Amino acid sequence: MKKILLTIAIVVCSISSFAQNDVTKFMGIPVDGSKSAMIQKLKGKGFTYHQTGDYLSGRFNGYDVKLCVLTENNKVYRIGIEDATACNESEIKIRFNRLVGQFEKNDNYEHILGTNQYIPEEEDISHEMTFNSKRYEASFFQRLNMSGQDSIQFVNNLRNHLLKQFTEEQIQDTTKTVREQVVFVSMNYYFDLISKKNVWFMINEEWGNYKILMFYDNKKNQADGEDL
């Protein structure tokens, strides 16, 4: 049974571990906990807190930026990052595409296979944003954290999830049709986990000036309709 589940886990995304409390991280800091604690940790990374305006400033990925810490029910759910200096249309296109490339090459991230998130060189983004309300956005997901003991926990959690829809005999079935169904459910389970660790960015335009807005989201702490 464990061998089969491990095989499925490898097929899902070559993962070897899973942590129940695994959340999005920004510069190694979990996007979680209280706002005051997060601000202190960010100050430890070299950022300066500005009480008037309630934001932090500093350097991130080679650029001067402003950071905002957002909370829901007193828990941090988002780190928002804004370029401190605006640039022109040509520069922002280069910056956006460079970011896409950096994320795609980073082994800590995944994106939806088959998607092309680059802006074509000939694209007139000013026209598209102004007249067609086009939104330039790219989205990535942080991989699950790796640690030896957590691989067992992942397998157990996956097994319990599969047993909600399949019998043990079906999970062990090696026929193509049944195995494809099991792998499909396993993949959905995995992507549901990493979807809570969303990192995305977009182009923001104001009066012909462009900036990158980036967001490190811990969707586990976001409102999910519980107050409706």
Image (cartoon, rainbow, N blue to C red):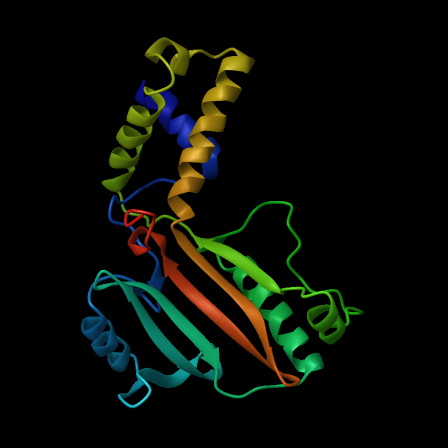
In this rendering, is residue 101 above or below 39? above
Q: Is residue 85 above or below residue 212?
A: below
Q: Residue at point 20% right, 67% down?
A: 34
The quadrant where residue 177 appears: top right
Viewer-side residue, 202 vs 91 = 202
* Apparent side of residue 226 relative to residue 131 in the rendered image (left or right): left
- Residue 135: x and y in percent read 63, 64
Residue at 33 percent across and 12 percent down: it is 168
User: Which residue lies at the image location 24% right of the left edge and 49% below the top edge?
Assistant: 21
Q: Quadrant of residue 170?
A: top left
Quadrant of the frame with the N terminus? top left
Residue 155 lies in what quarter of the image? top left
Q: Position of residue 129 (x, y in %)?
A: 69, 70
In the displayed structure, does residue 127 sit left or right of residue 27?
A: right
Q: Position of residue 144 (x, y in %)?
A: 36, 48
Task: Count up the numbered dots.
Answer: 0
User: Where residue 52 sits in the image (x, y, percent)?
Assistant: 29, 90
Q: Is residue 148 left or right of residue 217?
A: left
Whether 49 is drawn above or below 184: the answer is below
Question: Residue at left 63%, top 65%?
Answer: 136
Q: 99 or 74, which is in the foreground? A: 74
